[in-house]
């Protein structure tokens, strides 16, 4: 028996090592090069000089970077919570005894595949023309001006679209999670006469908890790295109020000549997200084990 | 036994590698006795004109084969190709900060021995000179076509009401008042897309400041607080004549609104004409330079190099490349490009000007033109967004806040450059 | 048992009403795809009105501009190959890491290492990757596929290991006792049991690769190989966008992935019907 386990372990390593090599070569290695660039004033081409920790020192004094962190975290927190609540409800709904199940699942999936150009045009139109028209008609002051043009509320516009698009993906994951819940568990709880509400909290949720973890990690990551919605809706405006970290890294690092500086930004950002995610996974793991 | 197990873990990786090799084998290779010249242009909208030009060139030459590629996202592609050290022979780019940066990175060849450089309008040669961070010996670009920015107006509307083309700032504001009084929106702004803030900004700034403002600042001779105040104030004044809350509407909205007759004027560049015409093909659009000053003779047209050709330093076929440039610079070839893209020729001589730009003709013919100020701004500084922020700022000190920020941010984003420039200056002084 | 089959009509209706949030924007996209540029307006009523003429002309033109069948072929090749390899490789990795993690700390570290790769902003990787792939002769479609396999590895490993937590050890242990190798146990027993997750991984990977612009843009530039999203950039230039053609093209590009999604959804349900997963 011992031998057997040893062989099992060997197989494990035989799989893991090539995977690790592949991953290292195309993820870690370029990342290390990026880290090296973060100590230079590289523009993305041509010559460059090493500037020591200057980029990192600058990061902490750069008001624009600071603002982008504030926006991104506010956005990610709201987005993660909203998306997970909505997706879980959607998944439960789409997984229960309803008609037109396939069609409905297909329809709710569409937002996730519409290209950025379409999303940008349609939602800009809705926020700029349709909602203000509705606001005028019913005298709703809040809606009368395009929220995308408001320094205070533009982020909510971006958030609405972000959530609208993200729900599809997280719903899929929740649905596949719900498939792992054996039917007899429900049958048992029905016999107990548990209410639907109670059944959800006592039976379903604990069983899909690993998927809650996955969804939390994935949606936090996706919202923290928000980029597409910014590009298609606001391009960081109005008054630079919706510049996300990824947007800044891309725009100034790739389009602009700040590759070195934005690499430093990316390194710090990476460390921050990893820390958040490990924290999430650890907390959730403890929860999973308790149950 | 154990070894066999390990071996079994690898097929996946091997499979990938094999697949990779197979796909790589699909790459095409073309062999012919001709010298290949590759030109990458950053204007995908001109792809048809370029195809025609390349075809004509290849018909006329049996020793050289020219390929013109105008991909989308060309700047990203060019930058990645530079990283790969996979250089084309010629690049067609704009006369903007990218040119300055590429030149500073020592990517281009001096082409002053090409006769055609002597046929370029002086103001465009000067613009390229001013784009050099550190003054260089020689000529590194062949300016081809230019665009111009100022004010586009609805000709039919102007005729119907008998409005006159304003020549001074005072006349302009008076005209706006008059248009407003007749119940029509004087101008439309698409400030949701921040870059459109730069259109009136540049057009005003060329008239109100010196063309070398940015390099003067880099040399420490002046500040933006001193030079940009009037431009900033007039930018604010414009808001009074625009639709309410212009930050809600993008470039596309503004083009559509102007095309639909929702405003009489639109402060933007000649590049917007095709988009406007796509919505309203029959529209009669006129144009005039931005009347930024109190005296007509102080006004300058805002025009910049939209397309110029630079030869990569690494090219191995200088002679063939020069042949291509000569061909591109023939009047006939230029006219093909202009017919398809509109705009202004950078070469001296008689070229047909599109009728929308007739109103700018005097300025063009008399070479009263100055480059866009933003061609000197580093894109990462996002001056466009700063202007939008400033315009949204309703407080009393908005102008001061903005100009101060302009100065401090400029120093921060151009730190390495300023050091370089001042070092160069010092060296120059020492030599003397 | 019969009682369970009863349709929940209230929920069905609520969910149908909810589709307005999808159909309204989709409706706008569809009518724009049929309109002419000269029909574009900022007027709400005008924007929501039907096109003057229902003609497939925009679609035909859009297909011409994007060299549709060729670009579609490339997109399909890249996406499908990526999906197949991702399901095979990532499920294996997810299984090994998931099971290894339960016993050994070293696998836990490997898990965190790979998953953390998900958080590296692409912008920082792009430049070095461009150089690296060029040097390795991978500046082609194979290179793009390989990069996708690495980019989606963290997410997929996260998904598969999460799924492994809900697959009991008992079956594997039984196979083990029967003398089957771990390798065989995986392909014969575990892999089929993962099928709902395969479908999920396939969808998510497909979504990411199908619409991706950046990777093919920087890796494939100059090879003459276009994917659909790359070809669709043709509709946009700095100073003008042909929304009508673009929308027609986007709607066309949406169909294959929607079909693929619906097939995968069936797969997720079949996994349950087969009773493959039991507590």
Image (cartoon, rainbow, N blue to C red):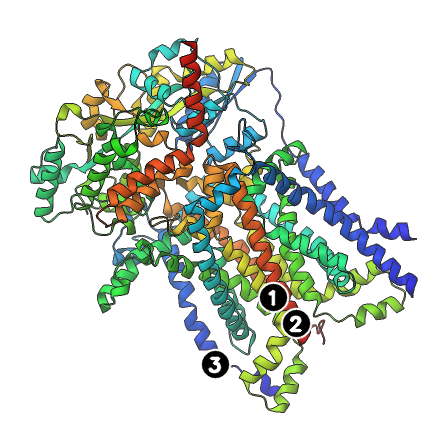
Label 3: which secondary element: helix
The label number, if any, that marks residue A288 in the structure image: 2
User: Whole-Å distance between the Cαs marked 2 and 3?
Assistant: 34 Å
Nearest to the eye among marks 2 and 3: give it. Answer: 2
User: Whole-Å distance between the Cαs marked 1 and 2?
Assistant: 9 Å
Whether the residues at callouts 1 and 2 have beta carbons within 8 Å, the answer is: yes
Report the number of discs.
Answer: 3
Q: Chain of mark 3?
A: C
Binning the other alpha carbons within 10 Å of mark 3 as few (below 14), some (14 to 19) or many (20 upward) gives few
Residue situated in front as seen by the camera: C121 or A263: A263
User: Whole-Å distance between the Cαs marked 3 and 1?
Assistant: 31 Å
User: Label 1: which residue?
Assistant: A213
B398 lies left or right of C88: left
Q: Could you say where residue B94 lies in the image, as x and y percent from the top left?
A: 39, 27
Nearest to the eye among marks 3 and 1: give it. Answer: 1
The label number, if any, that marks residue B73 in the structure image: none
Q: Is residue C227 visible?
A: no
User: Label 3: which residue?
Assistant: C9
Whether residue C139 is situated above or below residue A243 in the rendered picture: above
At 48% from the left and 41% from the top, the residue drawn is A58
Residue situated in front as seen by the camera: A181 or B324: A181
Q: Quadrant of the C terminus of chain B?
A: top left
At 63% from the left and 83% from the top, the residue drawn is A186
Q: Could you say where residue B242 lies in the image, as x and y percent from the top left?
A: 19, 46
Q: Could you say where residue B182 lies in the image, as x and y percent from the top left?
A: 8, 47
């Amino acid at each position: 028996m011992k031998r057997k386990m040893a062989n099992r372990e060997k197989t494990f390593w035989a799989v893991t090592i090539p995977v690790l090599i592949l991953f290292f070569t195309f993820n870690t290695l370029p990342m290390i090069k990026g880290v090296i660039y973060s100590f230079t004033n590289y523009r993305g081409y041509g010559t460059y000089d090493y500037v020591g920790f200057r980029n990192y020192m600058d990061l902490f004094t750069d008001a624009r970077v600071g603002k982008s962190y504030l926006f991104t975290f506010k956005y990610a927190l709201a987005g993660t919570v909203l998306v997970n609540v909505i997706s879980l409800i959607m998944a439960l709904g789409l997984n229960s005894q309803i008609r037109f199940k396939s069609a409905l699942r297909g329809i709710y999936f569409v937002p996730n595949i519409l290209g950025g150009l379409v999303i940008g045009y349609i939602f800009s139109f809705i926020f700029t023309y349709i909602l203000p028209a509705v606001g005028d008609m019913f005298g709703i002051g809040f809606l009368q001006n395009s929220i995308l043009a408001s320094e205070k509320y533009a982020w909510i516009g971006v958030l609405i679209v972000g959530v609208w698009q993200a729900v599809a993906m997280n719903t899929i994951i929740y649905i596949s999670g719900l498939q792992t819940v054996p039917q007899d568990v429900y049958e048992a709880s029905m016999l107990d006469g548990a209410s639907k509400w109670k059944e959800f909290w006592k039976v379903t949720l604990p069983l899909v908890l690993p998927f809650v973890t996955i969804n939390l990690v994935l949606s936090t990551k996706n919202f923290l790295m928000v980029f597409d919605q910014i590009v298609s809706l606001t391009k960081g405006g109005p008054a630079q109020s919706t510049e996300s970290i990824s947007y800044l890294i891309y725009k100034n690092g790739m389009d602009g000549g700040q590759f070195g500086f934005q690499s430093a930004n990316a390194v710090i950002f990476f460390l921050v997200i990893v820390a958040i995610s490990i924290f999430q996974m650890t907390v959730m793991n403890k929860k999973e084990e308790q149950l | 036994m154990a070894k066999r197990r390990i071996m079994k873990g690898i097929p996946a990786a091997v499979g990938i590698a094999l697949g990779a090799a197979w796909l790589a084998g699909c790459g095409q290779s073309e062999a012919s006795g001709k010298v290949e010249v590759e030109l990458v242009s950053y204007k995908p909208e001109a792809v048809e004109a370029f195809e025609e030009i390349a075809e004509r060139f290849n018909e006329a030459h049996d020793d050289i084969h020219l390929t013109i590629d105008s991909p989308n996202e060309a700047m990203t592609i060019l930058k990645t190709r530079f990283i790969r050290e996979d250089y084309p022979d010629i690049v067609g780019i704009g006369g903007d900060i990218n040119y300055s940066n590429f030149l500073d990175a020592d990517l281009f060849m001096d082409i002053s021995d090409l006769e055609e450089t002597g046929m370029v309008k002086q103001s465009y040669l000067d613009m390229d000179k001013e784009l050099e961070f550190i003054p260089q010996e020689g000529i590194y670009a062949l300016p081809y076509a230019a665009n111009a920015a100022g004010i586009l107006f609805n000709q039919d509307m102007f005729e119907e009401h008998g409005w006159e083309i304003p020549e001074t700032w005072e006349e302009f504001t008076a005209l706006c008042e008059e248009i407003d009084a007749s119940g029509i929106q004087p101008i439309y702004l698409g400030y949701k897309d921040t870059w459109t803030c730069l259109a009136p900004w540049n057009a005003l700034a060329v008239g109100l400041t010196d063309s070398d403002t940015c390099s003067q600042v880099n040399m420490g001779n002046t500040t933006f607080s001193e030079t940009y105040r009037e431009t900033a104030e007039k930018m604010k004044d414009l808001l009074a004549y625009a639709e309410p809350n212009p930050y809600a509407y993008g470039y596309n909205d503004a083009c559509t609104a102007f095309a639909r007759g929702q405003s009489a004027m639109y402060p933007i560049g000649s590049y917007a004409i095709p988009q406007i015409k796509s919505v309203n093909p029959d529209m009669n659009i006129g144009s005039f330079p931005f009347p930024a000053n109190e005296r007509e003779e102080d006004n300058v047209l805002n025009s910049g190099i939209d397309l110029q050709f630079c030869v990569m330093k690494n090219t191995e076929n200088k002679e063939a490349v020069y042949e291509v440039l000569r061909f591109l610079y023939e009047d006939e070839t230029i006219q093909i490009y202009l017919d398809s893209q509109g705009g202004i020729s950078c070469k001296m001589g008689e070229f047909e000007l599109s009728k929308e730009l007739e109103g700018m003709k005097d300025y063009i013919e008399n070479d009263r033109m100055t480059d866009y100020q933003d061609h000197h701004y580093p894109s990462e500084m996002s001056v466009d967004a700063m202007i939008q922020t400033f315009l949204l700022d309703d407080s009393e000190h908005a102008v001061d806040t903005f100009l101060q920020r302009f100065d401090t941010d400029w120093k921060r984003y151009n730190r390495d450059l300023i050091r370089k420039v001042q070092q160069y200056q010092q060296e120059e002084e020492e030599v003397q | 048992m019969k009682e369970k089959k009863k349709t929940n009509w209230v929920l069905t209706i609520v969910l149908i009403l909810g589709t307005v949030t999808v159909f309204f924007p989709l409706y706008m996209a569809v009518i724009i795809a049929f309109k002419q540029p000269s029909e574009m307006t900022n007027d709400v009523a005008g924007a929501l009105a039907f096109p003057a003429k229902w003609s497939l002309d925009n679609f035909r033109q859009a297909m011409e501009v994007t060299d549709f069948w060729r670009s579609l072929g490339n997109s399909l090749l890249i996406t499908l190959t990526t999906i197949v390899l991702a399901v095979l490789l990532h499920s294996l990795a997810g299984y090994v890491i998931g099971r290894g993690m339960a016993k050994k700390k070293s696998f836990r570290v490997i898990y965190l290492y790979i998953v953390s790769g998900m958080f590296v902003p692409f912008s920082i990787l792009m430049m070095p990757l461009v150089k690296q792939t060029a040097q390795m002769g991978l500046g082609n479609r194979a290179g793009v596929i390989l990069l996708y396999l690495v980019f989606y590895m963290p997410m997929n490993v996260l998904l598969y290991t999460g799924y492994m937590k809900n697959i009991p050890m008992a079956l594997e242990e039984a196979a083990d006792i029967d003398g089957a190798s771990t390798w065989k146990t995986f392909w014969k027993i575990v892999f089929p049991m993962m099928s709902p997750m395969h479908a999920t991984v396939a969808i998510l990977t497909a979504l990411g690769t199908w619409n991706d612009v950046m990777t093919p843009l920087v890796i494939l530039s100059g090879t003459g190989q276009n994917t659909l999203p790359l070809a669709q950039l043709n509709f946009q230039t700095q100073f003008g966008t042909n929304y009508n053609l673009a929308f027609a093209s986007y709607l066309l590009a949406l169909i294959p992935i929607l079909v693929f999604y619906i097939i995968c959804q069936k797969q997720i349900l079949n996994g349950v019907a087969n009773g493959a997963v039991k507590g």
